Amino acid sequence: MRIIGIDPGIAIMGYGVIDDYGGKFKVLEYGAITTPVGTEKSLRLKAVYDGIKSLIEKYKPDVMAIEELFFNKNAKTVITIGEARGVAILAAVNCGIQVFEYTPLQVKQSVVGYGRAEKKQVQNMVKAILRLNEIPKPDDVADALAVALCHSNSNILNAKLGSLK
């Protein structure tokens, strides 16, 4: 299964594309779609949409895994990130890709085994699980790979639970 993991943001949207061979992984690409501060928001959202759509067309993932929003004290920030998240989901749906959403707690639990893990712990586990030479930067990229791994783990668990029926 090919998974594109997304850590949503308007300035930096992290992404990671992995192939999952039953718990063995191959990293195809990871990085960030960035938009310059000061650019009109509609143009930033278009850049996010176009960037995600381009990645989907290039790598043809089976699914998109995207992190849900966490509560932020700044309502304007939450709204803007929500809009960026929405255009990423729209790009996937328009390309015929099924979207799965995971909370930050689920991602941490899945990758580290502890839902309140520190960011550095998640990054180190992403590096170890995917056998990377270094922790992907910026943090949003490591987070996107963690979201992809979370989907892989959820998919394996759901398959096992389905076989118990």
Image (cartoon, rainbow, N blue to C red):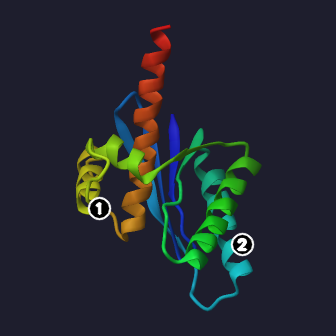
Q: How crowded is the residue under tag 2: few (<14 C-alpha within 10 Å), some, or many (20+)? A: some
Q: Is residue 109 above or below residue 10?
A: above
Q: Position of residue 134 (x, y in %)?
A: 24, 61
Q: Is residue 104 left or right of residue 11?
A: left
Q: Is residue 18 visible?
A: yes
Q: Is residue 123 above or below residue 77?
A: above
Q: Position of residue 115 (x, y in %)?
A: 32, 47
**Between 98 and 162, which is closer to the camera in this rendering?**
162
User: Label 2, on which residue?
Assistant: 46
In the picture, the disc for residue 94 is none
Residue at the far front in the pictured view? 73
**Between 120 and 148, which is closer to the camera in this rendering?**
120
Q: Is residue 118 above or below residue 95?
A: below
Q: Is residue 43 left or right of residue 3?
A: right
Residue displayed at 68% across by 73% down: 45
User: Label 1, on which residue?
Assistant: 119
